[in-house]
Image: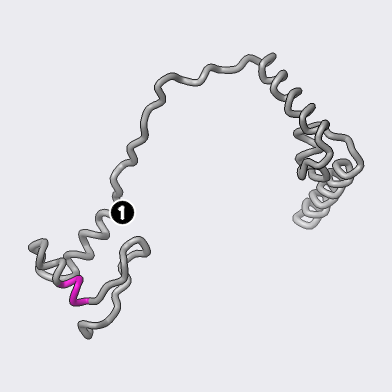
Amino acid sequence: MTEERIVPVKSWLRPTTYRTLLQQAHARGLADVGDLLGRVAEQLVAPAPRKTAPRSTPRPKLSAEELDQRRAARRAAFAADPADPRHGTHNGYTNLGCRCVPCRGASSLYGSAAMRAQAGTS
């Protein structure tokens, strides 16, 4: 192995030369590059746990009425905007309750494709 050979260790570590890895190993009091790479591998196998900040207050659970009100408001806003890019999609038909011609067509195509896929796997 030549000292100038490029040694890629991991994607998040910069590729470096063997000489540089050897210098890093000696600086850490390790015998050779294998020991250094072993230490790196140990860190990759067992990464440090992520620290996430706890929420200061838990989110309140919404009642069924509040969920229905939010759903109705979303549907009304969607129906009021004919330029919304979700028109003509299966999502617009099922989740937003739109029954315009493009949304009905998209839902029909989605259903027929699902039936074809189901028939093909049986």
Residue 80 located left or right of residue 38: right
Please name whichever residue, 115 or 42, is drawn nearer the observer in this view of the structure.
42
Is disc 1 placed on a helix, strand or loop? helix
The magenta region covers 18-22
- Residue 33, given in percent of the width and then of the height, sits at 18, 70
Q: Which residue position holds label 1?
A: 45
Residue that appears at 79% across and 49% down:
114
Residue toward you, 86 or 115:
86
- 5 is higher (above) or lower (below) than 62: below
Q: Nearer the viewer, residue 81 or 28?
A: 81
Between residues 17 and 48, which one lies in front from this camera angle?
17
Q: Amino acid at mark 1?
A: Val
In this view, 2 is above or below 22: below
Residue found farthest to the right? 101
Left or right: 122, with 4 as reference point: right
Count neighbours of disc 1 (C-alpha within 10 A) and say few if under 14, some if 14 to 19, many if 20 or more. few
